[in-house]
Image (cartoon, rainbow, N blue to C red):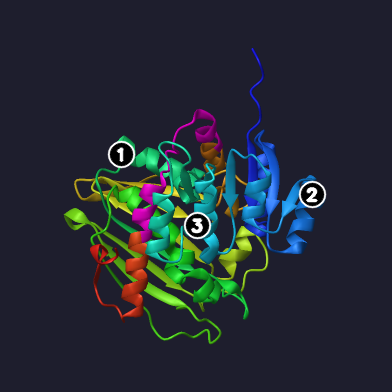
Amino acid sequence: MSKQRALRVALVGCGGMGFGHGVLVKSLGAELAAVADLSEANRKRAADAWGVRTFATTEEMLAAEKLDGVICAVTNPAHADVTVACLKAGVSVLCEKPMATNYADAKRMVEAQGDPLPFLQIGFELRTCPPFAEAMKIIRSGEIGEVRHVHFLQTPGSKKAGSWKVRPEITGGLFCEKLCHQIDVFRMVLGADPDEVVAISARNVMEHYAVPDNVYATFRFPGGKIAHITFIVGRAAEPVTHDDAEYMDKLHFLEYIIVGTKGSISYDLWRMQLAVTHNDGGHVTFSRRITLEGKNAEEPYHDIRPELVMFLDSVRAGRRSPLAADDSLRTMRAVFAAEKSSAEGGRPVKISEIC
């Protein structure tokens, strides 16, 4: 039997996230064929690390290289143009989240796909990472019954002055850059799309933030189901290490609470544990804790390896990814509805208003 040729994959954007993707591509048996990046320093870093050809633009790279796939890890506003150029060239794309910074661009990305190739997959890695793979296994088993409400709470450390992550012209906003993951999790756990969102915040305490530094958002789902976000900067100290005990000691907190008719699942990031309870006729009892494996809390939570494996397997098989961009577009529609509600002082916004 002849040996299957290695997929030729390119990387567009070789900053922190992009470089991590590049390392994984090589570890998964694919060929990292090229890197495109506007930054000369990033191009040199890629060439030094991997000996690949580098290009200043996506267009130059597509003209020079025959590729099977592209990983797009450029800044958020450039996602749409890079992705559409690659798809029009017949190359499937794994694009980092958020999909785009406005709904029109996100829709344009979906419409540029072929049938079945080339396809687009969005990097919502919480869909495939170990904590939520375990939680979804419990939910699908019926152990906690019908999920009725979900709560997400985070008290992150502040971003330093000058960080691009607090600039809405680059991020698209707090929901777009940071909380799109949580909205995607809500849709996955509740198995539906929200109908309406109310998002509100107090006045900022972080003077250098151009996005809200606190937000409280409630998403109404069909059948009376609810998902809620509480996000508060200004409580936890700035992150300095990946020592989980220190993060908890310095008041960092991140937890998901998933409540069903027969029990609940709580995921405490920094303790790397899922806790399961049972509700038996109104009597709630503690069931068990499931401890996740990893060298630190970020490893299982932001594990991009499963999503990259899914992307490469789909390219090899000549089919669309199970994490279809069409589904991710529905997440982004709810994201932009939340941005709109927040910008309008908490006005309830129907998801159908985003079109």
The three-letter code of the residue at mark 2 reads Ala
Magenta residues, dominant SS class: helix
Quote the CA–CA distance across marks 1 and 2: 47 Å
Disc marking residue 97? 3
Does the magenta segment cover residue 317?
A: yes
- Where residue 208 appears, as percent x and y from the top left, is 56, 84
- Where residue 95 appears, as percent x and y from the top left, is 52, 52
**Between tags 1 and 3, which lies in front?**
3
Q: Quadrant of residue 186?
A: bottom left
Q: Quadrant of the N terminus?
A: top right
Labels 1 and 2: the sequence-earlier one: 2
**Is 344 left, or right, of 70 in this rendering?**
left
Residue displayed at 59% across by 73% down: 164
Residue 21 in sight in this render: no
Labels 1 and 3: the sequence-earlier one: 3
**Is 179 left, or right, of 240 in this rendering?**
left
Quote the CA–CA distance across marks 3 and 2: 25 Å
Disc marking residue 123? none
Disc marking residue 49? 2
Residue that numbered label 1 is attached to: 143
Q: Quadrant of the C terminus?
A: bottom left
Magenta region, residue range: 312-332
**Is 241 left, or right, of 44 in this rendering?**
left
Q: Is label 1 in a helix, a strand or a loop?
A: loop
